[in-house]
Image (spheres, rainbow, N blue to C red):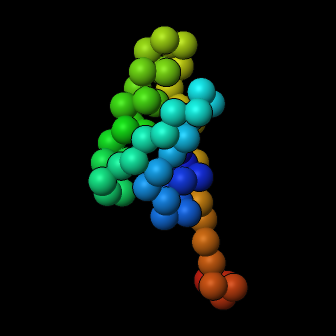
Amino acid sequence: MEEARYSGARRVRDQNGEEIEFRSDAELARAMVALDREIAAITGRTRNAFTFRTSKGLDHA
């Protein structure tokens, strides 16, 4: 689902071959959050969060 979302696709095919078409990016994002919560509830773990640090190549003195 993440790959589909970040590529701009609205259609996702699951491992069983079922295809789902989301009306918007927001709907796809809500589905991803719901799925993450369901997985966390089943496994007892939460999803890891990543923090990105970016730079334009300029050092701050």
Give above or below for 7 relative to 1: below
Quadrant of the image occupied by residue 15: top right
Residue 3 % position (x, y): 59, 52
Instruction: Name the one closer to the observer, 54 or 35.
Output: 35
> Residue at point 36% right, 49% down?
22
Give residue 35's position: percent from left, percent from top: 43, 29
Front-lying residue, 6 or 54: 6
Q: Residue at x 46, y 30 (%)?
A: 36
Question: Residue 43, percent across and down?
Answer: 54, 13
> In the image, 45: left or right of 27?
right
Q: Is residue 57 above or below residue 15?
A: below
Q: Nearer the viewer, residue 24 or 45?
A: 24
Q: Quadrant of residue 49?
A: top right
Nearer-the-camera pick, 5 or 45 = 5
Q: From where the camera sits, is residue 21 visible?
A: yes
Q: Is residue 15 above or below residue 61?
A: above
Answer above or below: position of 35 versus 49: above
- In the shown orientation, is residue 58 left or right of residue 47? right
Say whether residue 57 is left or right of residue 4. right
Q: Residue at x 51, y 33 (%)?
A: 18
Q: Position of residue 16 (x, y in %)?
A: 59, 27
